[in-house]
Amino acid sequence: MAAKKSKDEDPLADYRGKRDAGKTPEPVPSGDDALPRGDDDTFVIQEHHARSLHWDLRLERDGVLVSWAVPKGIPPSPKVNHLAVHTEDHPLEYATFEGEIPRGEYGAGTMTIWDRGTYETEKWSEREVMVVLHGSRVSGKHVLFKTRGKNWMIHRMDPPADPDAEPLPARLRPMLPAENRRLPRDQDAYGFEFAWGGRRLLAYVEGGRTRFTDGRSREVGGPAGLGGPLGRDVGARPVLLDGELAQVEGRETYLIFDVLHLDGHSLLDVPYSERRERLDELGLSGPRWQTTPWFPGEGEAVRETAAAQGLPAVVAKRLGSVYEPGARTEDWRLIPVR
């Protein structure tokens, strides 16, 4: 039997020590195997839905994947640095791994490949790693630099990939419907939604984290246990959502009916119908949050259904209307069911 290698001789000793090959689907190569060799030019970024959502950046180096956990993802602009926590080296086979790490195992949760490609090394030392990434979602020159212990920072050195991208607004007052007792005559010009009678909340989601403001644009703590899971569902895309917190089948649920900012671009001047299509494409659905349905031109049917379900009203929204923060206009109409 071969002698057990020391950690200095076996760069994957820490990796193997944290995993049981019989319980996890992750690749766990034998410690007696020779390390595979590549060209030191492969990188992968994996989205890891563990106890807290983060992204794992892995760079091939000397037969292993040198790894950092990045809680807020790779920074899109040189104006901001993101924390990157140095973790144990991973085997090269991990560059293609996707799957569910079982509960109770180290790193339990869902792992998916967010981006991958090749990279070039410009500098590599114990305290600084400078690389040029060539991926489908991330490209350009980045530097990782050590700050303290396992904590590093990652900085984008090139100009932003999207120079027109803007950060999420700090606060926004929600648009409000005008009250009206009748459905609009030209129903084909409107989309119709259920009014749930809940509490209006805007959700600002970025880097898998969520903060909320209320109907007066005041920052609020948000419902317990909602912000983190909603952020994980959104993932890396920065987005500003409009919705209301209401009781649905006895459970407090965040009902999302509009998207106001997405991927660094304001959608306030985009027509309502297009914003709804963008929102539907996000596919946001979870145990305590749902994208609400909308029905173009079907006012009578929506009002009858709302009455049958005991809902207080319906909202008619003009298909071509823009979003006017804080305004109450006839482009949105709140119509009681009785």
Image (cartoon, rainbow, N blue to C red):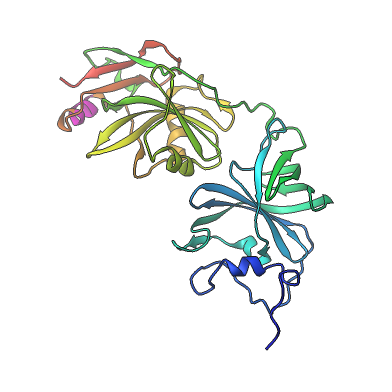
The span picked out in magenta is 300-306
Instruction: State whether residue 137 appears in this view.
Output: no
Residue at the image point whose x is 48% and y is 44% from the top: 232
Residue 176: x and y in percent read: 36, 16
Q: Residue extending furthest front?
A: 149
Side of 264 relative to 134 (left or right):
left
Residue 53: x and y in percent read: 52, 47
Image quadrant where residue 182 sits: top left
Residue at the image point whose x is 79% and y is 53% from the top: 126
Q: Foreground: 212 or 308?
A: 212
Residue at the image point whose x is 24% and y is 18% from the top: 335
Q: Foreground: 133 or 84?
A: 84
Side of 289 relative to 17 (left or right):
left
- Where 120 falls versus 18 (above or below)? above
Tally the numbered discs: 0
Instruction: State whether residue 235 appears in this view.
Output: yes
Location of the C terminus by quadrant is top left
Q: Residue extending furthest bottom?
A: 1
Q: Foreground: 171 or 186?
A: 171
Residue 156: x and y in percent read: 73, 38
Q: Is residue 31 magenta?
A: no
Residue at the image point whose x is 54% and y is 22% from the top: 170
Q: In terms of secondary structure, what is the magenta stretch mainly?
A: helix
Location of the N terminus by quadrant is bottom right
